[in-house]
Image (cartoon, rainbow, N blue to C red):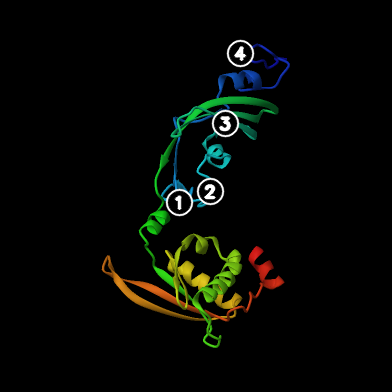
Amino acid sequence: MSQEFCVVCGRSDVPVVEGVCADCAAKRTALVRVEGRPVVVLCPTCGARKVGQSWERQGASTLLTPEDLTPLLVIHPEAGLRKVRWTEGGLNPLIRQLEASVDVVFRGAQRTETIPFEVKIEHRTCLDCSRRSGHFFTAVIQLRASLDDPREKSPALRARLEEQFDSMMGEASKSAKAALSWKEEKPEGWDLYLTDTLAARSLARLGKVRLRGTLKESATLWGRKGGQDIYRVTFCLRVPVGGGVVRPSAAERLERQA
């Protein structure tokens, strides 16, 4: 009876696939590689990364992280990734010299591959930061005291309104937090400017519920683009000053987690 053996090393005491044992296959095939010199585009202001045509991970570090680097590794289809250790060297802030020590499992045996490579960093200002720097907005939330509240001096009134609004911001969606661009002091409260109308509406409605407020919405024609009217929307949110925040019920929390 003929016995299979590795056509490279001649061993017949180990399994072979297409005439080659695992050790020889690993030596002849790149189990892990990085193609070319990858480019990571990040916003130097907020740390967002450009992925395709969109920006992601606002508020992330402007330093490269495993979340940036691991997707750059191309793993052999027969290998399973187990662990990656990163080492960074070099002094050029725009060309990062990296080394990945990668533990993989290939045909039942664990192996460690070491891959040196470079990553080019490109700094571009993301759309949201560009809009903020130019004071672009599509909606404004007018945070005001309830008409039934006694009058207060402006600094004290603004401080109390700001504290209440900030206390419920932890529940706001990521898109709402990202859209909040800047705020301005007004004698009667605050004007909060946002770069996304849907996010502003969501935030204003959250304020109405959590702060026991009233909400009115109005739109003003701002201009035209592509033959269509462009509107800026104003949400007037009036809340009882010092009324506190209505916390979500257990049912609401479970629904949000679902």
Amino acid type at circle 2 is Ala
The 10 Å Cα crowd at callout 4, few under 14, some 14 to 19, many 20 or more, is few
> Mark 1 vs mark 3: which is more N-terminal?
1
Q: Which residue is most to the left? A: 227
Closest to the observer: 38 or 159? Answer: 159
Label 4 element class: loop
Label 1 element class: strand
- Tell me whether the residue at label 4 lies in contact with that at label 3, contact meaning CB atoms closer than 8 angstroms: no
Residue 199 in the image: state x and y as whole percent: 48, 67
Mark 1 to mark 4 CA distance (whole Å):
48 Å
Question: For mark 3, what is the residue?
Answer: 76
Frontmost of labels 4 and 3 is 3
Question: For mark 1, what is the residue?
Answer: 55
Residue 48 in the image: state x and y as whole percent: 48, 49
- Tell me whether the residue at label 2 lies in contact with that at label 1, contact meaning CB atoms closer than 8 angstroms: no
> Mark 2 vs mark 1: which is more N-terminal?
1
Question: For mark 2, what is the residue?
Answer: 60
Frontmost of labels 2 and 4 is 2
- Tell me whether the residue at label 1 lies in contact with that at label 4, contact meaning CB atoms closer than 8 angstroms: no
Quarter of the rendering containing residue 26: top right
> Mark 2 vs mark 3: which is more N-terminal?
2
> Mark 2 vs mark 4: which is more N-terminal?
4
Q: Is residue 8 left or right of residue 178?
A: right
Q: Is residue 15 left or right of residue 185?
A: right
Amino acid type at circle 1 is Trp
Mark 1 to mark 3 CA distance (whole Å):
29 Å
Mark carried by residue 8: 4
> Mark 4 vs mark 3: which is more N-terminal?
4
For image coordinates 49% across by 59% down, the residue present is 178
For image coordinates 64% across by 76% down, the residue present is 244
